[in-house]
Image (tube, rainbow, N blue to C red):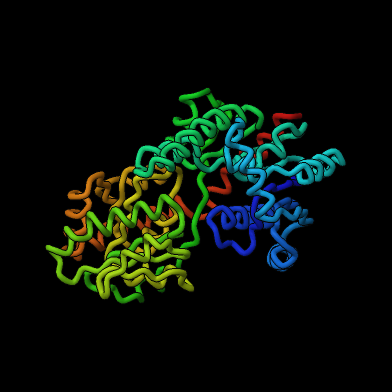
């Protein structure tokens, strides 16, 4: 097939989760013999140059439109009274829409794949087979932010934005032949507003470190780890809750306990959690697996979120037993008690972590089961092969 992939951000370098997913998808499709063009925004000439260096040999063509942040911020300010969610308005561009329409009108493609709802306005009206990788229900995610935020202004914003996102997701889904979400809960959330019979559960995968590397790591007694981008509201809320409310309960029972917060761009609120020798905030690290292979237990104390959580799959891939909330596991579907420990309140999370820190055979049993689960279900190819089949079906249905 000849495919146009439409992305809001440059997939290279793959420093954010959505960029990594798009990068891996393009490389997968190229490896399967498909011809792939990419259309995306860049901030400046440097980011375009880096993009072409990283994906120029993989994409048949790369189409870019320069979108400075100041212009997007100005456009976003107009969303407060409009119907479009903020993230959709942020990426509005007549130049991008016209560029895509021209390419499609020339008959260059069999299918257009759009990554995330933020780019759907550019492709939803195209007269060509098209798919939308929603990934998560933004409406569900924002609704949870509203429910857990304590700041009145944040709560007002999340309430307004979640209402917009819920309506937008339910409406825009009908404009595409196929839409893909990471988990059943995301589909169920959207279907509370409108049916989406064209939706399919199709999560993305993860890079899995070699087992030899995992088992060469020396596990540090009492080491508890969480990973992720520490500038997102969901992760800030999670690590703050754990550090302030749950970790003290663990410390009382396990004197050597330490909590590692691993991830780029930690906000001031996260930095403030540091306690010498007990709570360590690393900031960006060269390789997150260096830390995951040294810890004894991983935690995913998410109260807010939707879809598949990379941090959980990464930890499982390192044979780490994971103690997670239901929110963190809902897009992964690991079996509680056998593959993952799922807890919903402060005391039960603390008790599960304490039990695992004290019980090496149990850590080993769950960690090995988790690794097996990831190898069977969460490689890039395992999920992209399903995606490819559904994309082919979408093109066949149009003939």
Point out the image quarter for the C terminus: top right
- Please tell me which residue is depicted at 74% across the width and 45% down the height of the picture: 1
The part of the image, by quadrant, that contains residue 291 is bottom left
Q: Residue 118: image x %, image y %?
A: 62, 42
Residue nearer the viewer, 248 or 395: 248
Q: Residue 334 vs residue 344: left or right? A: right
- Please tell me which residue is depicted at 39% across the width and 71% down the height of the picture: 282
Q: Residue 176 vs residue 15: left or right? A: right
| Residue that protrudes farthest toward the top in the picture | 194
Q: Residue 240: image x %, image y %?
A: 32, 56
Residue nearer the viewer, 251 or 70: 70
Q: Residue 211 vs residue 249: left or right? A: right
Residue nearer the viewer, 300 or 367: 300
The part of the image, by quadrant, that contains residue 167 is top right
Residue nearer the viewer, 309 or 49: 49
Count of marks overlaid on the render: 0
- Please tell me which residue is depicted at 73% across the width and 44% down the height of the picture: 93
Is residue 394 visible in the rendered image? The answer is yes
| Residue that protrudes farthest toward the right in the picture | 106
| Residue that protrudes farthest toward the left in the picture | 253
Is residue 57 visible in the rendered image? The answer is no
Q: Residue 292: image x %, image y %?
A: 37, 67
């Amino acid at each position: 097939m000849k495919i146009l992939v439409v992305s809001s951000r440059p997939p290279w370098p793959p420093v954010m989760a959505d960029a990594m997913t798009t990068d891996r998808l393009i490389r997968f499709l190229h490896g399967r013999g498909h011809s792939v063009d990419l259309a995306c925004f860049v901030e400046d000439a440097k980011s375009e140059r880096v993009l072409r260096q990283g994906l120029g040999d993989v994409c048949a063509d790369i189409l870019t439109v320069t979108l400075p942040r100041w212009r997007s911020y100005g456009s976003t300010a107009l969303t407060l009274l409009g119907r479009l969610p903020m993230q959709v308005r942020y990426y509005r561009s007549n130049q991008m829409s016209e560029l895509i329409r021209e390419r499609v009108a020339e008959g260059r493609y069999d299918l257009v794949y759009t990554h995330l709802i933020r780019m759907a306005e550019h492709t939803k009206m195209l007269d060509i087979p098209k798919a939308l990788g929603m990934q998560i229900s933004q409406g569900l995610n924002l609704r949870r932010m509203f429910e857990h935020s304590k700041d009145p202004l944040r709560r007002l914003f999340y309430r307004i934005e979640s209402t917009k996102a819920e309506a937008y997701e339910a409406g825009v889904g009908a404009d595409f032949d196929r839409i893909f979400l990471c988990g059943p809960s995301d589909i169920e959330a959207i279907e509370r507003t409108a049916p989406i019979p064209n939706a399919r559960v199709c999560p993305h995968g993860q890079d899995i470190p070699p087992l030899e590397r995992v088992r060469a790591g020396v596990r540090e007694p009492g080491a508890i780890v969480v990973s992720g981008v520490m500038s997102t509201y969901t992760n800030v809320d999670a690590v703050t809750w754990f550090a302030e409310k749950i970790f003290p309960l663990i410390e009382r029972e396990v004197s050597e306990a330490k909590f590692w917060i691993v991830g780029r761009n930690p906000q001031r609120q996260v930095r403030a959690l540091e306690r010498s020798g007990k709570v360590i905030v690393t900031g960006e690290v060269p390789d997150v697996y260096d830390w995951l292979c040294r810890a004894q237990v991983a935690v995913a104390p998410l109260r807010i979120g939707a879809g598949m959580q990379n941090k959980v799959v990464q930890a499982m891939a390192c044979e780490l037993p994971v103690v997670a909330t239901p929110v963190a596991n809902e897009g992964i579907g690991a079996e509680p008690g056998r593959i993952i420990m799922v807890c919903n309140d402060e005391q039960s999370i603390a008790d599960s972590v304490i039990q695992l820190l004290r019980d090496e055979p149990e850590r080993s049993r769950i960690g090995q089961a988790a690794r097996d689960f990831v190898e069977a279900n969460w490689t890039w190819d395992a999920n992209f092969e399903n995606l490819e089949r559904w994309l082919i079906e979408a093109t066949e249905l149009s003939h």
